[in-house]
Amino acid sequence: MFSRRHPFLFFVTIISTCMTLVFLGFVGLVHLSSKMMDNGFSESLGSEKGNVGIVEVTGPIISSKKIIEDIKTFRENDDIKAIIIRIDSPGGGIGPSQEIYRELIKTRAQKKVIASMGSVAASGGYYVAAATQGIVANPGTITGSIGVIMEYANLMEIAKKIGISPVVIKSGEFKDMGSPLREIKDNEKKIFQQLVDELHLQFVSDAAKARNMEVAAMAKLADGRVYTGQKALHLKLVDRLGNLDDAVQWAGELAQIKGTPVPVYPREDKMTFIRRLADTLLKDINISGAISDNFRYIVN
């Protein structure tokens, strides 16, 4: 009867009850996950007594902070004898890629570091992989794409049609170069090209040095094209074909680990875990989009 007389209130009550149950389950799981992760490693992904650390580089490389923290954690842990950089990334910012590269160069002076390529390890993903002592790729891995690109959209004609007239007050001639509201000048394009060429040379030089290749030989392969893992092996851009397990076995051999190498993953960032958990719970109860969006906003 209540549902018929007050359908809106009945709906709100049901939703509130669902949200309460979700929240209680959510709190319980977070509490459980905190206990699991207090030791610095994730027991759900690997034994805390593992001896091969797995650091994942997944998706666009936008920030290097978490990845570098994970590398340092394994480097400073005496129980970890070798490190695997598991890469499944199309690339990203050259700055973060260089930061990870530098950290791996420092790390491999102390421990064996191997790269394992997933479906894609291109551009910045290859930049990172090159810093390791050995690269394992699948035959169908998409890698390479060694190069630098800078692009932007010119919105000048659209601005004219809707009556937008840009007004620019600048401190120097080139302060607004690359503005989407005007054509790029020849001297500005030349500056951008010089910038891209300089960054490209840094990429090629770092990759060649880490891979013990001549810069000229690496430069011939660095025209931006992608290669399969099988082709990359032929071109000496990678060292072996295989999956993550093969990389772990190889790392164990290089580190002279007695017995079976045991992989272990670093502790997952709690906020990342909370976001993933919230998304999973919201999908499971399949409540309305508006409430889902609000709840995700609160979690963030």
Image (tube, rainbow, N blue to C red):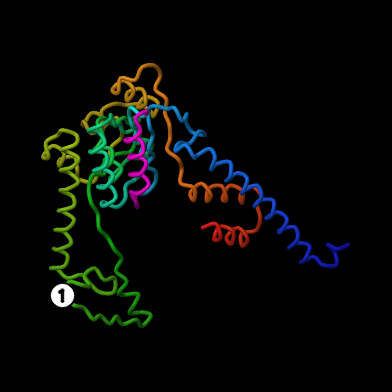
| Location of residue 291 with respect to 89 vertically, above or below | below
Say if 185 sits above or below 117 in the image.
Answer: below
Q: Is residue 171 left or right of residue 60?
A: left
Taking the magenta stretch, the answer to whether it contains residue 251 is no
- x and y percent of residue 128 in the render? 28, 41
Horizontal side, residue 38 vs residue 133: left or right: right
Residue 69 among those drawn in magenta: yes
80 w.r.t. 5: above or below: above
Residue 144 coordinates in the image, percent (x, y): 26, 40
**Residue type for callout 1:** Glu
Which residue is at 44% across, 38% downward?
40
Question: How far from the left and from the top, in percent, is residue 151?
Answer: 27, 60
Q: Residue furthest top?
A: 259
Pointer 1 residue: 173
Residue 98 rendering spot, x and y as whole percentages:
24, 47
Which residue is pictured at 34% across the width and 23% down the height?
Answer: 252
Q: Residue at x 69, y 54 (%)?
A: 20
Image: magenta residue range: 61-79
- Seen in the image, is 283 located left or right of residue 162? right
Figure quadrant of the N terminus: bottom right
Q: Nearer the viewer, residue 173 or 294?
A: 294
